[in-house]
C-alpha cells in the first residue's frame, strides 16, 4: 500500500519520501484515442469521475414547437413531455424563479439535441460522448457555479445533429482547465447534498461523489512558491496568451496552497501541465498549480493557506517550474495584484 505522503512530509520542509509512482493516464475516447502517459507520483485514488462513469450519447432530438399549459402542469413536467430541458424552456420564455406558469399559457419549446443526465455523469464525460467542447455546452445552457449537474436535467448539446463516429469523437475531444473547473463534478440527485471535504488525505472520497466548495474566500492569497517569474499573465511574444504565471523553482520545492480551500482536482489529465492540483476557495475563486513532480493531496481534501499540496517538477515542460493560475468563475485573472508584494 502506498504511504500517505501528506502525513509523511512536514509542512514546507523535510526529506522527500521514496516515491512509488502511480501511473496516471490521459486518453481521449478510451476505445480509440492514442494513449499518452506521464509518471507523476500521486496518492492512491480512484479514476476521475469522467473515466469511472462514461456517457452514452443517446440525446433526444426535439423539434421547436409551442406548448399550451394544462391544469396540473409544471415546468419540469412539460420538459418531460416534450423532451426539452426545463431550464431551456424557462430561458426561451423569459421565466424567472420560481418559474410560475398558468393554464392556457403558450410556451415556446426550443428545439435541439437534449441529453438526459444520469447519476454520476460529468460534463467532461458528456462532452467526450458527443465530441463537443464542454465550454460551449456551459455557455449554451447558462450553467453556473458550482457547476454540479442534476440527475434528470436535460442538457442542450450544441453542434451537428448527426451522431459522430468514435474516431470523430476522439479527434474532437480535448480537456482543458475550464473543463475541469466547470465539468468535473458528478451529477447529483435533487435532494442530495455534495460531500463535505475531509481534513485528511487518508479519507478518499469516491470519484462519483460531488464535493461542496467553500462558501466564501477566507483571508487573502499568498505566493505558492518563491522564484523568478519566467512568464507573466497576459499576451506573450509568440502571440499566445498566458492565463497565469510561470515561476522557476528548484526540483522538489514544496508547492503551497495560496489560500484556504477544498481540493477540486488532482491528476495529470492535461499533458501540457503535467501534475496538476486545483483548489476551490469560495466566492468563485479557484487556483491552479501545474508541472508538479509529486502530488500529495486528494480530491475533496480541505487545505489551509500555506499547506504543502505538491512538490515541484518538470512534468509537462522542459525545466523545473510552477504554473500558477487564479480564476474568478471561468475567467483567468492576473495573480500579481492579488498576491503580497515581493
Image (cartoon, helix red, strand yellow):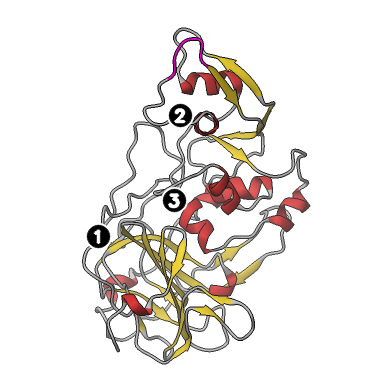
Residue toward you, 289 or 84: 84
Q: Quadrant of the C terminus?
A: bottom left
Look at the numbered discs 2 and 1 and tell me whether their residues touch, using CB distance below 8 Å: no
Disc with the residue nearer the chain's start (3 vs 1): 1
Specify the farthest residue to the top. 71
Place of residue 201 in the rendered image (x, y in percent of width and height, measured from the top left): 31, 62
Regarding mark 1 in the picture, which secondary structure is present there? loop
Disc with the residue nearer the chain's start (2 vs 1): 2
Q: Which residue corresponds to the image point at 47% horizontal and 13% vertical from the top-left?
A: 73
**Mark 2: few, some, or many residues within 10 Å (few <14, many ≥20)?**
some
Using the image, tell me which numbered label, if any, was put on residue 50.
none
Picture layout, residue 32 above or below residue 223: above
Regarding mark 2 in the picture, which secondary structure is present there? loop
Q: Which residue corresponds to the image point at 78% horizontal and 46% vertical from the top-left?
A: 165
Q: Which residue is mark 1?
A: 199
Q: Which residue is mark 2?
A: 95
Disc with the residue nearer the chain's start (2 vs 3): 2
Q: Which residue is mark 3?
A: 207
Cα separation between marks 3 and 1: 17 Å
Task: Name the side, left or right, on which 172 lies relative to 96.
Answer: right
Q: Which residues are magenta?
A: 101-105
Amino acid at each position: 500500500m502506498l504511504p500517505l505522503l501528506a502525513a509523511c512530509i512536514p509542512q514546507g520542509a523535510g526529506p522527500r519520501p521514496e516515491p512509488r509512482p502511480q501511473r496516471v493516464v490521459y486518453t481521449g475516447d478510451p476505445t480509440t484515442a492514442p494513449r499518452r502517459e506521464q509518471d507523476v507520483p500521486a496518492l492512491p485514488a480512484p479514476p476521475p469521475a469522467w473515466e469511472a462513469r462514461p456517457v452514452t450519447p443517446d440525446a433526444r432530438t426535439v423539434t421547436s414547437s409551442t406548448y399550451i399549459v394544462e391544469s396540473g402542469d409544471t415546468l419540469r413536467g412539460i420538459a418531460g413531455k416534450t423532451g426539452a430541458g426545463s431550464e431551456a424552456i424557462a430561458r426561451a420564455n423569459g421565466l424567472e424563479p420560481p418559474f410560475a406558469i398558468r393554464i392556457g399559457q403558450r410556451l415556446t419549446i426550443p428545439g435541439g439535441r437534449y441529453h438526459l443526465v444520469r447519476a454520476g455523469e460529468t460534463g467532461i464525460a458528456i462532452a467526450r460522448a458527443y465530441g463537443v467542447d464542454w465550454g460551449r455546452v456551459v455557455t449554451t445552457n447558462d450553467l453556473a457555479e458550482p457547476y454540479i449537474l442534476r440527475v434528470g436535467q436535460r442538457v442542450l448539446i450544441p453542434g451537428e445533429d448527426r451522431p459522430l463516429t468514435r474516431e470523430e469523437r476522439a479527434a474532437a475531444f480535448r480537456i482543458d482547465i475550464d473543463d475541469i473547473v466547470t465539468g468535473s463534478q458528478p451529477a447529483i440527485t435533487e435532494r442530495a447534498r455534495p460531500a463535505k471535504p475531509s481534513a485528511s488525505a487518508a479519507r478518499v472520497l469516491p470519484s462519483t461523489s460531488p464535493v461542496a466548495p467553500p462558501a466564501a474566500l477566507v483571508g487573502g492569497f499568498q505566493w505558492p512558491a518563491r522564484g523568478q517569474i519566467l512568464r507573466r499573465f497576459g499576451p506573450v511574444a509568440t502571440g499566445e496568451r498566458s492565463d497565469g504565471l510561470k515561476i522557476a523553482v528548484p526540483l522538489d520545492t514544496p508547492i503551497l496552497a495560496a489560500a484556504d480551500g477544498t481540493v477540486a482536482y488532482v491528476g495529470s489529465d492535461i499533458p501540457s501541465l503535467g501534475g496538476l492540483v486545483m483548489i476551490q476557495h469560495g466566492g468563485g475563486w479557484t487556483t491552479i498549480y501545474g508541472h508538479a513532480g509529486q502530488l500529495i493531496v486528494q480530491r475533496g481534501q480541505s487545505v489551509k493557506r500555506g499547506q504543502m499540496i505538491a512538490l515541484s517538477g518538470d512534468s509537462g515542460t522542459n525545466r523545473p517550474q510552477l504554473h500558477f493560475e487564479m480564476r474568478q468563475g471561468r475567467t483567468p485573472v492576473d495573480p500579481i495584484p492579488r498576491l503580497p508584494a515581493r
